[in-house]
Structures are given as C-alpha cells and as structure tokens.
Amino acid sequence: MNRLALRAEMVLRRLLRRPRLDLPLLAALLLLAAMGLFFLASAADLSWRTIGAQAARFLLGFAMLYLVSRLPPAQLKRWTPALYAASVLLVALVLVLGEGRGADRWLDLGVLRFQPSELLKLTMPMMVAWYLAQRPLPPSWRDTGVVLLLIAVPAALIAKQPDLGTALLVMMAGGFALFLSGLSLRRIGLMLAVMLALLPVAWHHLHDYQRERVLTLLNPESDPLGTGWHIIQSEIAVGSGGVLGKGFMQGTQAQLQFLPEHTTDFIFAVVGEEFGLLGVLVLLALYLYIIGRSMWIAVNARDTYGRLLGGALALSFFLYVMVNGGMITGLLPVVGVPLPLVSYGGTSAVSLLTGFGVLMSIHAHRKLMK
Amino acid sequence: MSRRHRHPLPDSGGDAQRRFTRRAWASLALIALAVAGLGVRFFWLQVVRHAEFVTRANDNSIHVRFLAPPRGMIFDRNGTVLAENVPAYRLEVIPDQVHDMHAMLQRLARVVPLSADDLRRFHELLKQSHRFQPVPLRNRLGENEIARFAVERWRFPGVEVAPYLRREYPFGMLTAAVVGYVGSVDAREAEKLQGTPWADISQIGKTGIERQYERLLRGTPGYELVEVNADQRPVRVLERVPPRPGENLYLTLDMHIQKAAYAGLRGRAGAAVAVDPRNGQVLALASSPSYDPNLFVGGISESNYRMLLDDPHHPLLNRVTDGTYLPGSTVKPFLALAGLELGLRTPQYTVDSVGEWHIPGVAGRGYRDDVRGGVGVVDLARAIEMSVNTYFYKLAYDMGIQRLSAFMARFGFGRPTGIDLPHEAAGVLPSVAWKRKVLKRPWYLGDTVISGIGQGYWQVTPLQLANALSTLADFGRPQRLHLLLATQAGAGAPIVPASPPPPGAPVIAHRADWQAVMRGMVRVVEGTRGTARGLDVGFPYPIAGKTGTAEIYSRTSKQWDNGLPTQELALRHRALFIGFTPASDPRIAGVAVLERAAWGGRDAAPIVRDMFDAWARQRRLPDVPLPGDVLPAYAPLSLPPGQALPPVPAASSLAPAGSVLAPSPAAGGRR
C-alpha cells in the first residue's frame, strides 16, 4: 500500500517537473495547428461549431503530447507489446462487431468514437522498433520474417474492414522502422519485387470501389461525373487559385460546394484555391521543417528503440502529407487520408500529436552530447 | 551494408547507430526531393495551367444536389399504417441570394403568414447551415399560400417552394409510446452523422421505434448532378442516383388491442401492456396521458413544447418503459411459485390470518392484513384469491431475502427487459446487495417481510411486470419481449420476418407448481371471494389474474381502508392488475397500472379485460404480417380513433374452454 502511494507520488512528480520539450518542434506544431484552424475556418464557412470542435481536439492532442512526453522511452518500451496487442485486439473486435452495414470501422465508447486502426499508426512502429531493438542489426532473414508477420496480421485485419488506405499506411509505418534498422538494400529490393509480383493477386481481392479509384486516377476525364469528380474539382480549385489565391472564404470551388469534402480530406485544395501557391509553399515548408526536426531527434536518440521509433514516426508523418498532397493534385488515387493537423475531424489530430509526444519523450532522453 | 560482424548485444556499438544515421539522412534527402516534386506539381497547376483552370472554375456550373430518401413506413401486424410519409410543400431560403434577410422576411410575411416559431426555427437552422444551401422557413404550405407566393415570387430571389415528405402518425396519441416520432437533426446528432452519407438528412428518429430502428428506416440518400445558371438556379439534371427508401417495418402490435388499451385508460395516468406469452410479441403498449407525436415533426413550436413539459401529468413520460411503481400484491403469484418450487410450501399448506402478523420472537407493531380481524385459515389458492397478506409475510420470512430475490431475478425483475425500444428503466428488485450499495444500510428482517407483498423497496415498470407475467404464463419460458415483427425492403417487396432472440432456459421446474398457482389466479376472477370476481362475465375463456393495490405513501394512521370512499383512497393508491387467458393455454397476457385509483380489481382489471375482449373478437392474429399495401383482412380501424370497434362474433378456432380447475392434459402437450 505504502509502496503504491510512493510510486503514485513519483509518477505525479515526474509529470509536474519542468517540461523538457523540444521547443522548436513544439513551436512548429503550434504554428501548424493555428494555420490549420485558420484554413478550416475559411473552408467551413466560419462555422463556429466546427472550429470549436477542432480546437477542442487540438487541446486534447496537445495535452496528450505533454503527458506522453513525460514518460521515459524505457517505460514506453516496456508497455509496447501490451499496447500493440491491445490495438490489434480492438481492430479484430471492430471487425467482429462491425454492424455489417458498409464500412463500419468505428468503435463507439459512448463519450468518444474512434477508429482502432488509428491506434496502430502509432503502436505498429513501436512494436517493430521494440522487436528489432533487442535483436542484432541489421536484422537476419528470420527477424525480418517475424517483423513482416507483425506487420501483416493487423494490416490484413484492417484491409478486411475494408479500409485499404489505412492498412497501407499502417504497413508503411512498420516498414519504415524495418528500413531504418539497416536492412540491406538488396533484400529490400528483393521483397519489393516479390510484392510487385503479387500485385495482380491483390487486385483480384480489391473491392469494386477501390479498383474504380485506381482506374479513375489513371484517367479522371473518362468519368467526369462519377468518381473522377473529386479529382477534377480539386484540380480546378488548386489551379484557379494561382500564385496568391482568391482570399479568405473567397474560393468559389469550396464555398459553392463544387469541391466535395472540402473541410476534411480535400482541405489542401481549399488552401491552394484561397491562398495560392504562396500558401501551399508556406505550408509545405512548415511540414518539411517538422519532418526534419523529428528526424534529427531520432538520430540523437539514446538507444535503438528510440531511434527506430522516432525515425518511423517522422517518415509516417511525411507519408500522410505526401499522400494527401498527391491526392488533391491528382498524382495519387483518392484515399481517405487527412492532411495532418489541418483536415477537420477524426482521431487523426489527437493520434498525431500523441505521436509527437513520443518524439518529445525520445528527445528528453537523448544521448549526452558527443 | 557490412555484414562482417554482428553485435551480440543490441545497441552495443556505433555501427548500428551509424547505419541508422546514414539511412535517416538519406531518407530526409528523398523527402525533400518528394516535397519539392509536390511543389512543382502545384506550380504546374497554379502557374502554368492557371488561366485554363480559372476559366473552368468560372464555367463550373454543375452542382451536386442531395436527394433525401423516403423514410420507411411503419405498420402494425395487420398492415394498419402507424407512420407514413405525406407529400407536402415548404418555403426554402438560400441565404446567399438574399441581400437583406430582415427586410425580405418582413415583406414575405405579408404574402405567406410566418409565425414567431417559424422565424425562431429558421434563424436557428440558418446558423447551422451553409450560405448556399436552402434552409426551410415555413413547412406545410396550404394550396392558397402556394398560389399566392407563386404570383409574388419575382419579388423574392432566393426563396423557393420545395416539395418534401412530411412524416405523419395517423393514430397520433394512440401509438406515441411505441412509434415515437422524428424531429430535426440536432447539433450532437449532426456531429455523429458528419462524414457519412446521411450528413444532409434533416429528420431523424428521436424516440420509440423511430429511434430504435433509425438505421433501417432512414434509407440511403441519392444525389443529382444539376447544371445551374449564373443565378445558381438549376437548368437541367445531368445525372441522377435515386435515393433508396428505408425499410418498412411491421410491428407485433395489433391496433385493435392497442386501441382497447389506450381507450381503457381513459386519459388517466397509467399504462397498459399486452403480450403474447408464447413468443414475447408485444400486442399493445399504451401510456397515458399521451401526446400528439405529429407536433414534433419538423420541429415543435415553443409554446406546445412548454405545455407538454409543464403538464403535471407528464405526458412525455413513457410510463410503460420508464414509469416505476410498487408492484404490490401482483408479486404474490410469483412468490407463491417460489414457495412451491423451493419446497417451502405445498398447495395444501395453510396459514391462519388473524388480521396482523408478527415476526416470531419480535413484539411491537405487526404487519397487517387488508381486512380487520383477518380472513381465517387459507391455503395457497385462497391466499392468492383473496390476496391474504399474512400468508405472504410468513412465506417471505421463511424464504429469506436471498432466495426471494434470486428467484424473482429469474423473472427479469430489477433489470431492463431488453425490448427493442431506446430507453427502459431498470426498476429495483429488493436484495441485500442492492440496499447496501444504494442506500448504504443493512438489511432488516422487516424489509424481507414487506417485500413478500410487493411493498418496501420494490420498483417495477409495467413492462417488467408484463415480462414476468409472460414468462409465468408460458410455463416459465422467458421470451424476450419485442416489437419488430418483420421488415420489407419497399412496397411490394417480400416481407421478411425478423428473428427474435431465442427463449431463455425455463425457470419453472414442475408443471404441478405452475398449475397450483394458476388455479389460485383463476379464483381471483372466478372465486366467490376473488379480488377481481366477475371480471370474466361474458368472456369466452377462463382468465387467470392477480390484483395489486400499492400504497404510495407509508401509512401513518391505524385506520383500516375498507369502507373509505374510493375518491379518497385513489389519492394514495396505485391500482394494478395482471392477467392471462385462456388460463390453461395462455395466448395473451395483459398488465394495467393506474397511478391514482382506489383498487386494482375495480379500476385496473377492466382495462385488461378490454384488451382481452379486443383480442377475442378476432378470429386469430396473423402470424405473418399482412402487407401494408393491400386491404387488411378484416375491417380497417376507423379514423380518427375513439369510435367503437365493429362487433365481430366471438367465434374462435381455439379449443373450447374446459374447466380450468381441472385442466385437461392437452395443456401440457402444447407445442
């Protein structure tokens, strides 16, 4: 009993101690969140309900960031297998409970609804880093096999929901950790070749709507009123924005409802339309800075676990930006990936900021100066 | 990559770290390249092809228009319409096209009357919606109003008359407790719907079946790609994906019985339920006083809502599922059954009622019978017939609270029945654990004694009572009470029976025990001293029942109630009756509860009899629902409700009612 009280006190003390956050990264994230709210205000036609809800998510997200940053990476490492197992279980649960009506990926906890697959974006690289951190590196074939299995099981569950986009993102998050562990390029090339060979098989298993999306990408004008609609309208929005943009709440594409989902997945197009190439470049520069800073933290981490995890998180963040940017400019198929910290809604804002909390924790326990 | 030597321990040297650093910077370089590539793509779209896209944006004239799906209809088991969609017209305003909203509304009010409620609702919706989306201003336009507006329309850019489907409940108050109603989507619901295909629906089930089966009823929205002119007015439709209507629902309800239940309550505060014990189908579910659900459709006016909220009789409360009451003597048949099943009593065991009962060895205030001086020596059947408290005080005392609450829990007391309605109270099944947890006080022997007559901590909903009664009537087989009988994908589509959950494990071990209790319950109605004697006069089958008269306030005087004027008693009594028929082969079980009435037998029992009459008047209830789009097999119910049912001869396909006191062996061979 006494020991428990003592431990509780220690944890409390640790939480209250002077924060040792990486201030440049924190400043960049706060700036991004502020810009995100500003863009959202314009895209959502100044709907205070929408803006307020998003602001609340940011508050929760930054609180999570702070809390997680107080935990030493050793602690996170100890919890990793349990966290991973729990999130895989939740994904399986959703699959079982999934009320059989379309794509039901939500778990309703009464107060908050969330997609358990979102958790895996964080716990997947954690697990891969945890496993590889206690094996000799670069990983042997056997270890590589184990990691691939750790990646494949939850990815298959998510793909079954069916949520191919998230399944790919989760796979990539794990794959990044594997890549950073120093797996030889020859082996990576070999595995990619095998995957490429399996592509026709995968195509066979895709849902019709998923195939349609890929086909539409190849030729959007072939189906201007169907699924190509999103891409064409998005390109028109971006292109008509020009260098300086049409101004706050002045984008005709967004405000006249030509652009679908303009507060969520397609908000980047609104940025392009209303704030022009200038706005886009500022946003991209900010993203690039955040990714670079995260990578720097990973490089300076004290141990393998911190390095692999930090690096994988930085690369995942890049992936989200790239996939969303590619989608709205017509370079990639329409997959439901929100623009990090700018798109409205979802669990994405909270889970992303939690991930940055992990990075802050790694930073706080970096190795002593060389 | 060097594979010359591997480190035996992870992270023991700089090699892995160097490798990581190399990879990290390499990927960062690639990232910078990719982001630059993305920048180039933006440059390509925004600078090189800028002029082209500006033209295309200006020519963009295709709008996606949301098409609301028609909501599924709701029928009773005979195909009588309980909820339907009626075409209507309303005024809609596109805010972006109105320059001075205030002035426009003032001018418009001179053409089409706008009430304060209309304006309040409009301004509320205005805050929630987009500038370019039509906002409903006035629902249910009359033909004259449409004509008058058509003439003046040129003066009101951005104002349109639009058709819509209005939800209507033809039976209004009669079915409000079951069907519920739809209303406007509120902020919390909108949040939940965001990002789903239903983000643009305007009405959503708020209570009752409308809420419970929202997902089945709402259908799938469609959309229309419309070419618009410079004023954003539609010119032609390019593509149309029609909405898919919601599913039609058939309820287990039988409107003949439902009507009898509601009419029987005569507006008094109370509830009536009828179920088919053989399968758990709810045949009637009425709460009184009720409200008109049609008032809520499209937004209720503030004055109407105030009136409903401030009404001292709480018409919005669904007394069947959410009203909790002392069950009083209606628990006695269950207690008697417990005595028999637990081996504490035989049907022949007798108790001497002398007017007051004392816990052995405890002096002081006794526990009273209803009749001064008691009724003498009674056996089990007589104890049920005359509702003799002393018999049940002693039985509860002998049983002890542990066994009492464990046995009663088998009949579903103290927890929701699991009926397919959105809300249900759990009630209270008295137990030592409950009292310690909720009241934080120990259990006393006296608590056990009064639990035996349904007083004390007991709280049951009329639905729980119906659930327990149904289990009892079906020889101890618990059936989950339910309202959904079948679904239908659209008019003319096949009617698909819903699959109710399977019955639970039987809770009565010996058929003889059941018969002993049932005989006592029949004597409540047939016996010369039964508390509901005469209830079966003119009824073709024997009825088994039990009255209950629960005291709302604890007694302070030593007065006896008998002989007091009923008006005075009504102020402090709740009247209850439970019953099923035919007694030895039960096919309908009914419960009636009145919040302010003198005696269960005199006041509540006739309501149950009314429901039984309505049931007996029909040849048989259709097992498979009759399609809602063909004529019902028997005379449709008259509208508006309130008139008498067409008399149907009480001819029946049921076996002739034998003497119940000596039940035929056929009763056991059922099913």
Image: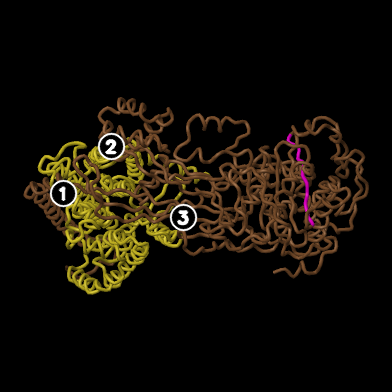
Chain colours: A yellow, B brown
Q: Please, which chain is the residue tagged with disc 1 on?
A: A
Which label sits on residue A236? 1
Q: Is residue A368 visible?
A: no
Q: Amino acid at mark 1?
A: Ile
**Residue B157, percent from left and from top:** 26, 34
Q: Looking at the rendering, in which quadrant would you find the N terminus of chain A?
A: top right
Disc 2 to disc 1, how far (Cα)? 21 Å
**Residue B308, percent from left and from top:** 56, 33
Closest to the observer, B292 or A43: B292
Which range of residues does the magenta coloring cover? B542-552
Which label sits on residue B216? 3
Q: For mark 1, does the 10 Å Cα neighbourhood hold few (<14), some (14 to 19), or many (20 or more) residues?
A: many
Closest to the observer, B315 or A358: B315
**Residue B1, percent from left and from top:** 16, 68
Residue B545 is covered by the magenta coloring: yes
Q: Please, which chain is the residue tagged with disc 3 on?
A: B
Q: Is residue A29 above or below residue A230?
A: above
The residue at 79%/59% (across/down) is B342
Q: Which secondary structure is most common in the magenta stretch?
A: strand
Closest to the observer, B591 or A135: B591
Q: Is residue B210 visible?
A: yes
Disc 2 to disc 3, how far (Cα)? 31 Å
Please give the residue where the numbered disc 2 appears in the rendered image.
B131
For residue A27, side relative to residue B371 (left or right): left
Q: For mark 3, does the 10 Å Cα neighbourhood hold few (<14), some (14 to 19), or many (20 or more) residues?
A: many
The reply to whether callout 2 and callout 3 are in contact (CB within 8 Å) is: no
In terms of image quadrants, where is residue B471?
bottom right
Closest to the observer, A20 or B399: B399
**SS for callout 2:** loop
Q: Amino acid at mark 3?
A: Leu
